Image (cartoon, coloured by chain):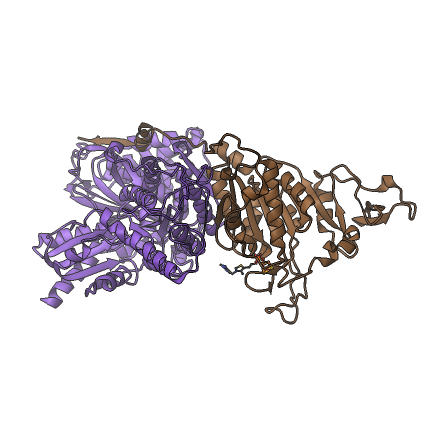
Chain colours: A purple, B brown
Amino acid sequence: MEGSAPTHHSKRPEQELDSAVVRFAGDSGDGMQLAGGQFTLATALAGNDLATFPDFPAEIRAPAGTTFGVSAFQINFGDRRIRTVGDNVDVLVAMNPAALMTNLGDLLPGSLIIADSGAFTERNLHKAGYEANPLEDDSLQGYRLLVVDMHKLALDSVQGLNVSKKEALRTRNLWALGLVLWMFGRNTAITESWLAGKFKSSPDILAANLAALRAGHAFGETSGMPPQYPVYHVPPAQIPAGTYRNITGTEALAYGLVAGCQLAGLPMTYCSYPITPASQLLHSLAGMTDFNAQTFQAEDEIAAICAAIGASYAGNMGVTASSGPGLALKTEALGLAIATELPLVVVNAQRGGPSTGLPTKTEQSDLYQAVWGRNADSPLVVLAARSASDCFDTAIEAVRLATKYMTPVILLTDGYLQNASEPWRIPDLDDYPDFHKQRQVTVEDGFLPYSRDPETLARPWAVPGTPGLIHRIGGLERHAGTGQISYDPDNHQEMTNLRRDKILGIAKDIPALEVCRGKDKCQVAIIGWGSTFGPIHRAVGNLIEEGLGVSHIHLRHIWPLPPNLEDVLRGFDHILVPEMNDGQLVTLLRATYLIPARSLTKVTGKPFKISEIEQAARALLEERA
Amino acid sequence: MTVQKPAPAARSPKDYASDQEVRWCPGCGDYAILKAIQKTLADLDAPPENTAFISGIGCAARFPYYMETYGFHTIHGRAAAIATGTKLANPDLDIWVVGGDGDSLSIGGNHLMHLLRRNVNLQYLLFNNEIYGLTKGQYSPTSHAGTRTPSSPGGSLEQPVHAAPFALGCGARFVARCGDVQQKDLVVVLKRARAHTGTSFVEILQNCIVYNDGVFGHIMDKSVAAEAQIHLTHGEPLLFGENGNKGLRLRTSPLSLEVVTIGEGGVREEDILRHDETDLTLATMLARMEGPDYPVAMGVIYCDPAPSYDQQFKDAHPLRPQSRKALQDALKSGYIWTVE
Ligand SMILES: Cc1ncc(C[n+]2csc(CCOP(=O)(O)OP(=O)(O)O)c2C)c(N)n1
Ligand code: SF4
């Protein structure tokens, strides 16, 4: 593997960095996600820890050259644990004026811009809203600017190959990738082997892509590159020993659901209706039918959850997934699953809202909907995953709780988690205890479908097809015990209490919460949930290094809350709750514990920056000092 | 998984009655349908533990409570979707879905459409009383224009949807119609429905004695039945009427069925069409017939089996437990690297 300082740049200044943020930005059709993905792979193999953030437009084919058609892929990598995608961009690859226009704001002075001058035409400048060419006036003076005509160089590189001009120009992303790989001292071998697999059946395209990739790399190495640009060296990170792969939240969820069902000893029936950013999970699972899993594309979200409930009724693990608007449609059926006490896992990949909102942008604004968003008193379990790889464990936990307690479980992820990738130490499945779910099969005289396990308060799961246990279930209130329809006032009170207590009782079955960074008692606790984990964790680390009394607490179990959370929170003078919504967890915590927790909110469709969290914590410390 | 008990003595309709008190209004057509279904299952000696009734919400949808089989009373309009999931998870179950006209064709219209086009192997019984019973008598999507109800005091304005043609339009492969009081015929139709592989759609004209009494009187009353109904038998001539001498003939322009009388205007017996259950065009014309000009078609209107969705789905998703090692290997697929 690479990772040690390359030797072939001897005349060039070398700059050692502990971490770097690179963003590839271009038009939707420019192949930026591909370039970013390949750079990620090479980076991971070079031993760096990393985090990525693909950011693409809502339109499938936005008009070329426009600012709203810009697609970007950001990677932060370094020699230490990387928890965020990085606050500021060190190297921006701008494939057209619109990409420069929309991304410049994330660069600090002195950062490097690599711009394809071939795309800075009159027309493109105009579309992006530039009056003059920024590559030629002095507006980019504060930055280091590397202007290369990638249009021309890519065309040159494929000369003599059997591709059209259009196809030749499409190799610009690989040309750019080649250059950036060189810049960070990486070779092109991994990308070459990936390309060879991808374009197996189109040898001409393969040849062109390889030529462009190599040309970009060679451009750096040969005289093409002005000598004052350094090569960067980011040493490998100290990461725990093990076998690694890159994984997105979506893939981790798919594997986690499959693994959870295997641990429960149940086949999975996954039912879903496409919606961004949850559709990818349907795609992933549709390719995993070898693993005792079925996937069903329903006619809408209501049918999807209903089919999943029907499957659970029949004895499988019913799973459905959607995003906010789809979860709204599933609401009534969730009530049915609560009333009939059937196991169900509902993944909600949150996105910006309300209504259709920002389909491709991330947000955490469905916490209310998950915890409280149903008619009547209808408690269920709510979990949230904190990182791409954590989606795996959280999915297993969702299946465990759903089956053990015969309850629907909502698992919250978000657009960022679904798409972001990170290196994942592949777990050893033998480390996970089985939680085989026993369905009732023994014949019982006077079988009571709503009798309860005294420990869990779960009712028995007897499925159609089982002799001797014939019974009926339904959404009408039913007698605690026999399950027969009952409108008795006291019975409704009792059933409401039982439904509540069953869910609250789960708190006894979840791990006690631990402060995940910092002291157990100090001035400020920053408590978060979901994908804000990375920025909070890094911010708290930085503040601790400065000697400040700040700790990080992160929730996986949103409802019921961990049993010791109140005690933990009481160990701090101040509590800060950063969330990508208008203040939802903070309300839940204040309502539950009557504590004066403070809110830090952000709903720009982008993750928190580390500095934003640091700033808020500092303000809190100063205000109270 | 189905575990069949050793065959007990043949079951009687009573064996399919649950211990629940039936709570429909006295005189409701649903009672007769309940009786017919219990008789059907008894005649077929259907294993109760392998039978599930799944329903939405409405008077009709209370049905599962009264059956000594597995039962799931779900939410308004969604029984088709829930039953689909149940069938995908366990294709061996014998599933009957029961819904009213509101349940099936207003709130649940979308799911019914997709159930039918998918051809999930189950029986869908639509109890059509042309009214919302449970919510106390508002007009429904099958109510005739001009129906006066509390929500349409001046008469409803909407054109009704016709259940059987709707089903055919959705791609149903089995469509039948029957009346609640036609015990014998109903049992025959229900047996045919159960024998059919794929979605068997049965529209049952059901009298709501409280909110829409006699809405099918012009079809079902004994005094008019012979003239107002035509009973379909595959391969037999399409004859009806008091004297059995009326029939349906194909008119070519405009392409349509016409009612003719044998012996009148030179009509001979050979001119009468024969029923062909597998003919979709004929079925569509038959399903659309209504009075006063035409008799209403009763019995199996269309039956042309096609592969069922759940069977195809099962072949595409063969559920079998997978070893931990296989999953572990899958986790390690793609680009992996080792950190020492
Ligand atoms: C989501 C929802 N909306 C409305 C209702 C109220 N509702 C219950 S039954 C029904 C209509 C029943 O009519 P139909 O399906 O024709 O059955 P019938 O009672 O006539 O047998 C309505 C509107 C409900 N239970 N749930
Ligand atoms: S309201 Fe009508 S449909 Fe409902 S039970 Fe009474 S008679 Fe039957």
Residue B278 rendering spot, x and y as whole percentages: 70, 38
Is A42 or B20 nearer to us in this picture?
Answer: B20
Q: Choose top left, top right, bottom left or bottom right for residue A371.
A: bottom left
In this picture, residue A165 sits left or right of residue A174? right
In the rendered picture of this protein, how many numbered marks are placed on residues? 0
Q: The N terminus of chain B lies in which quarter of the figure? A: top left
Q: Choose top left, top right, bottom left or bottom right for residue A587.
A: bottom left
In this picture, residue B281 sits left or right of residue A380? right
Is A329 or A355 nearer to us in this picture?
Answer: A329
Image quarter for ligand 2 equals bottom right
Q: The C terminus of chain B lies in which quarter of the figure? A: top left
Residue A316 rendering spot, x and y as whole percentages: 41, 39
Q: Choose top left, top right, bottom left or bottom right for residue A438.
A: top left
Residue A195 rendering spot, x and y as whole percentages: 36, 32
- Whether residue A579 is situated above or below residue A277 in the rendered picture: below
In this picture, residue A92 sits left or right of residue B278? left
Query: Does residue A223 appear in this view?
Result: no
Is A291 or B124 nearer to us in this picture?
Answer: B124
Query: Does residue B84 appear in this view?
Result: yes
